[in-house]
Amino acid sequence: EAQVTQNPRYLITVTGKKLTVTCSQNMNHEYMSWYRQDPGLGLRQIYYSMNVEVTDKGDVPEGYKVSRKEKRNFPLILESPSPNQTSLYFCASSLSRARGFYGYTFGSGTRLTVV
Amino acid sequence: GQQVMQIPQYQHVQEGEDFTTYCNSSTTLSNIQWYKQRPGGHPVFLIQLVKSGEVKKQKRLTFQFGEAKKNSSLHITATQTTDVGTYFCAGPGGGADGLTFGKGTHLIIQP
């Protein structure tokens, strides 16, 4: 089944403790992206990747890192989480960005709480 | 950067009534996409509109792209309880690549 898999689904952590949220897709998509969803603010893009080893900042990149060493994986790293990073995070992938816009396939989401 | 405004924020309807959400951009969009997010779920891609004046239908859902490619609408005829959720429009981003999402319209259906 074509899908984007995120782990974990739920995570409670303490301020300053490094964490990684994994994202993997099995559709051979070139484009991957991370969004955070907050009440009243909607979906905001954190980072995106056009292809392997090509990543760039979205609208709200502060406090986050990403890497794209393989086409299928696009982990989101919080080096020193803070309470304002408490949010619902979605990974999304799409066939390509360079060749035009295609619909995104979203993962099931990761609800992160930083205390 | 690119902003996509969506109204209304909330819409309460009785089951069987129609529902419409509107999406507006200050700039011309090359395309617009629509997504649905069920409560507790993730956004699911519904459709993409590309051409000026384009109208597409999916069963009870009708999607329109304005002639100037600055606005779009989603209309649901005779809502059912399965239509509950948040409907987002999304257009090409401004400063960053990828999609910029509207804040969504929450559809609440009263049986």
Image (cartoon, rainbow, N blue to C red):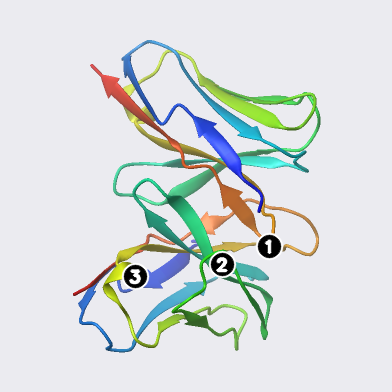
Marker disc for residue A80: none
Task: Judge the density around disc 1: few (<14), some (14-19), many (≥20) Cα neighbours within 10 Å.
Answer: some
Could you tell me which residue is drawn at 46 percent across and 74 percent down? A23
Say which amino acid is labelled 2. Answer: Ser
Question: Which quadrant: the N terminus of chain B?
Answer: bottom right
Say which amino acid is labelled 1. Answer: Asp
Asked if badges 3 and 1 are on one and the same chain, I answer: no
Side (left or right) of A103 relative to B28: left
Q: Which one is closest to the eye, mark 3 or mark 2?
A: 3
Side (left or right) of A47 relative to B108: right
Percent coordinates x, y for residue A111 in the rendering:
29, 64
Q: Which residue is mark 3?
A: A85
Viewer-proximal residue, B49 or B91?
B91
Percent coordinates x, y for residue B103 in the rendering:
47, 42
Q: Which residue is mark 1?
A: B97
Label 2 and label 1: CA atoms lie apart by 10 Å
At mark 2, the secondary structure is: strand
Asked if badges 3 and 2 are on one and the same chain, I answer: yes
Looking at the picture, does residue A80 appear above or below residue B24? below
Label 3 and label 2: CA atoms lie apart by 17 Å
Could you tell me which residue is drawn at 68 percent across and 52 percent down? A102
Say which amino acid is labelled 3. Answer: Gln
State which quadrant residue B39 falls in. Answer: top left
Label 3 and label 1: CA atoms lie apart by 22 Å
Looking at the picture, does residue B107 appear above or below residue B99? above
Marker disc for residue A33: 2
